[in-house]
Image (cartoon, coloured by chain):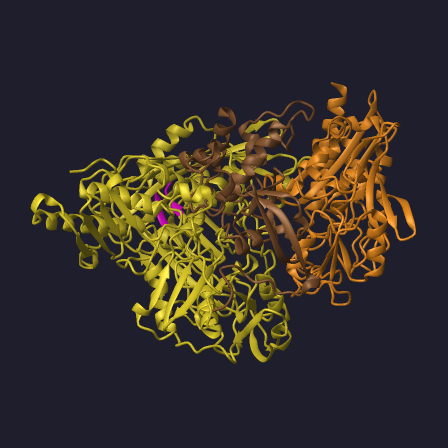
Amino acid sequence: MSTGAVGRAHPRLEGREKVTGTARYAVEYPVDGVTYGWAVPAAVVRGRITRVDAAPALALPGVLAVLHHGNAPRLAPGPDRGLWLLQEPAVHYRGQFVAVVVATSLEAAREAARLVRIDYDAGPHSTVLAADHPGLYRPDQVNPSYPTDTAEGDFDAGYAAAPVRMDATYRTPAYHNSPMEPHATTAQWRDGRLLVHDSNQGAAPVQATLAELFELPREAVRVVAEHVGGGFGSKGYAKAAVVLAALAARQVDRPVRLALTRQQLFGPIGYRTPTIQRVRLAADADGRLTAICHDSITQTSTIREFAEQVAVYTRSMYAAPHRRTTHRLVRLDVPTPFWMRAPGECPGAYALESAMDELATAVGIDPVELRIRNDAAVDPDLGQPFSSRNLVACLREGAERFGWADRDPTPRARRDGRWLVGTGVAGSSYPARARAAAASATARSDGGFLVRIDATDIGTGARTALWQVAADALGVPPERVEIRIGDSDLPPAGVAGGSMGTASWSWAVIGACEALRVKLRQVPGGAPADGEVTAEVSTADEVRDQPERPRYAYGAQFAEVRVDVDTGEVRVNRMLGVFAAGRVVNPTTARSQLIGGMTMGISMALHEEGVLDERYGDWVNHDLATYHITGCADVERIEAHWIDEQDGDLNPAGVKGIGEIGIVGTAAAITSAVCHATGVRVRDLPVRLDKLIALSPLA
Amino acid sequence: MQGGPEQETTTDERHSSRVAFEVNDARRELTLDNRTTLLDTLRERLGLIGAKKGCDHGQCGSCTVLLDGRRVKSCLILAVTLDGRSVVTVEGLAGPDELSPLQAAFVAHDAFQCGYCTPGQICSARGMLDEVARGWPSAVTGDLTAPAELTDAEIRERMAGNLCRCAAYPHIVAAVRETATTR
Amino acid sequence: MRPFRYHRPADVAEAVAVLAAEPEAAYLAGGTNLVDLMKLGVQRPDLLVDVTRLPLDAVEELPDGGLRIGATVRNSDLAAHPAVRRDYPVLARALLDAASGQLRNLATTGGNLLQRTRCVYFQDTGKACNKREPGTGCAARHGQNRDLAVLDWSDLCVATHPSDLAVALAALDAVVEVHEPDGPRDVPLAALHRSPGEHPERETTLERGTLITAVRLPALPAARHSTYRKVRDRASFAFAVGSVAAVLDLDGDVVRDVRLAYGAVAHRPWRAYRAEEELRGRPFSPELAARAADAELAEARPLRHNGFKLPLTRAITVRTLTELAEGARS
């Protein structure tokens, strides 16, 4: 019996705490005898520390310790050398944390960090991605485990034979996740056990990493992440803050709060790699694709391979007999790039969807129609039918809602005073996957239920969505259900990432609730008279045994922009997205997720750019005054809609995940709109006025 | 273990000061390291965690509080300067049992996701609405000498000092608009 | 941040005397720039002299029609002042285009004029900067310099002055009232800021320890037809990549008087005297405005990444003056 909680709009459960300032984030838990950690970044790009002089720092009142490779507690080498912090004199990139100061006040910690004297032997370095970098290589696989290259048919021959060809190279700069809450941790050791309140996207993986690094049984590590101030991928695994805090707390035998500074978030916590993408498309005179090739070049660090799956998007998006995708990588003396909202799909879609727009112009076909014409009936990559594919429905409904029908494709044809106006469209898709998870459901004698799962709500609305799912699965009004998440003491579940959270977690929650109902049937009266009845399940077997098949969410993004004809300033008049993402559990929080993703796409298209200085090997614009993210004044009208989609081949809740698809395609829709408005195709993001000022009649 | 839940003052007398000011209508008197910002005083000395540290350099707005009724970024204010002044944080906006209209509107419109910038957004909106009531113009006001009208474009501009990476902006605008028109 | 003493002086004379006696002291006003730079380790005073409670927070309308603005008047109060909105819209608009509501509530008139460059190399103590540490070199000269100067830079420094307010004040021929150890003095705004030259660490012509006490605006009826146009990389809350403050007074079609100043192009707010000369006494046309901008920018030397500032500054000059001219005619 469903109570109809799923599908109903509901304000997020923790709303009151968040608007009254009582929701506690990582460094906001009261702890006795608290101390403060402050990380010290390396001042060279590549080299070795030859000397650390901590004396001036230690001489300050309130300073308890300066940890560095010469005195820090030892760590076991874990899977990520980037986390093997303060263990070796080697410096692998500028900004690598090479020391931590611990003091009894933030003021003392900040000043002491400045006073730690570190001498280095610095070597030559390479920090700039280039298409002809001598270090380019072919990785064995790309994130997370896709084949590096694919080929179907004969691209070269197909391309050469086609009447219409399009060949363009697109570049995206480094992007920084920039969650509003920095990576931050409160770490406490007690009787050999480690407790951390940490800002992350998954307590269990952080727990596992800490256990490995500190050589502890997992049960000896507890990770709490009840409220998390955003992550966008950058908090998907344990990062430096939690390791440094735990090291420092062990060293001084007191609790340590350690938050990275805003400046320290530009690099060491991961970022989206810059990309250089060549896309070649060939089509017949009707715009039917005959050949597609997408070649991606990205960077990784010297300490860990992260190969962003940039061209994977192209493998399954549009059909063509001849297809090829490749990924090449170069190891630079930079921090390791990592996940940022829709890794792979986001930059990949920018290139492919832009290329589709360029092809539409080349063949003289409307860009919506071009995409409809090249829709794939079966997955071009796997050769299997999709579990559901509603790209065309999204395009059609989006075109209708947006008012696309009478669009004059002529560039620079629409004006509004001194503004040039243009519209653009892009398709989008994102895989619908699930991970194994465990959950428990408990019936209490008072008629209430408690559902426990180590899910994380980084702002996605997961807490509320799971609560709704649980109510329906238990067949009770949601008011009788309590949900507890964000703690590694709860039944283990995976990271909030890859748009897999709700799919994975709801699967376990439904399983636990159903198992509880079975148990309760054995109980007289169907409810415990006193005490509790609990059922716990894991979906490991079911998820593992789910047949492989192409499962994707789809979307269509529409943008209208205006460009100041005199200055080249770009504004987005409106954005509209229509998505096919399976069942929508909570329209309120779902809309926020989709709009948030689309807005981050605006940010990518127009505002964000990590500007690297090759000589220093780091991003010079490492704060929020100079690394611009989209602000309130930049978002005028933005709408997210979804089509009713039932897909029985996903997971018990029928959801596809919505955290990432909103950003996929957005930048292409905007750059195509800019091209429509101005006639200028910007192929290196962001679109900024300096790239359009040449148009100005006054310039 | 030493000390309490508060951070210690780690300077000598020359570099610290006795400061008395009001926070959420309660008088507070503290000895503070002169270096301590209002933000760190609230968070690390007074246990008021509502004001958030997003950038610590006045670039994100998460730390916004009201100082003598005006919205300010508390990360750039040295607490030593505040003798005799009055601070209101997000904790001081709600009544004992009910949310203020702005807070309720933020919940109703889902004007946040991760919630980290939210207290700053709400304090900023509170201060901004008072600025509008005083007739202050903004950068998008057409006629500088006419009374201020709170269009959506005005709200967007006036709230531009509060970044939200989750990008709840349209919902923030809706919540502010609703509060402005119903109060 | 280095530990520092804190002092609240009773009056201006005491404030100036304290600064004179303390070589490492600094005035604290709104703090929006100083506290930021102290956290970064760029500035390390050992004594802060808090001037915000001195009686310098009044805006007075002067008998001659001018305006006297106290040094600690907050940017938001100044922008909202009826006389500023009515008589000096260029000033109100420059203030409103700057920073954010919260920062404008803190930032003061005097502090705004003395704010330091936003050059990213100046702000990072790990990078070479002659302004921050004379003799260390200018990393920006051959580094990432999109936001930096196109006019009047030296090989030692290519920083720009970040203030919007100062650009408007430059156009308005404002006079800065200062109190030096020897007593009060008037400094024309145009003479307040220096070119970087051989000493980029010296940003103003003021002696160390001088306190700005007020800014005086001469009566300028033409300023009722004035405006400020700022171009930046997002819609709001960003420093300028180009800006123009303009006052235009037409007699029929002929330019009777014009005041023009540029932001984001040089180490100081850039009064465009040459452009004004081109314009004055001639019938206004967009073409004339373009020629005027060209005359002003003739000696510009763009850096590797900021060549766009020339066409941009030219475009906003023409556009802004043309709009003012159209407004005057209608």
Q: Which residue appears farthest toward the top when viewing the image?
A: C330
Chain letter for the part of the structure drawn in yellow: A
Q: Quadrant of residue A642?
A: top left
**Which residue is at 46% across, 72% downward?**
A253
Residue A185: name its quadrant. bottom left
Q: Is residue A297 left or right of residue C200?
A: left
Q: Position of residue A396 (x, y in %)?
A: 34, 32
Relative image position of residue B101 (x, y in whole percent): 47, 32
The residue range painted magenta reads A282-291
Decide which of C97, A182 is in the foreground and name it. Answer: A182
In the displayed structure, would residue C246 be above or below residue A109?
above
Chain identifier matching the orange colour in the rendered picture: C
Is the residue B127 above or below the residue A62 in the image? above
Say which residue appears at 52% left-offset and 62% top-offset.
A129
Left or right, residue B51 beside residue C133:
left
Q: Which chain is brown?
A: B
Whole-percent x and y of residue A44? Answer: 59, 71
Residue A290: within the magenta? yes
Query: Could you tell me which quadrant the C terminus of chain A lies in?
Result: top right
Q: Quadrant of residue A587?
A: top left
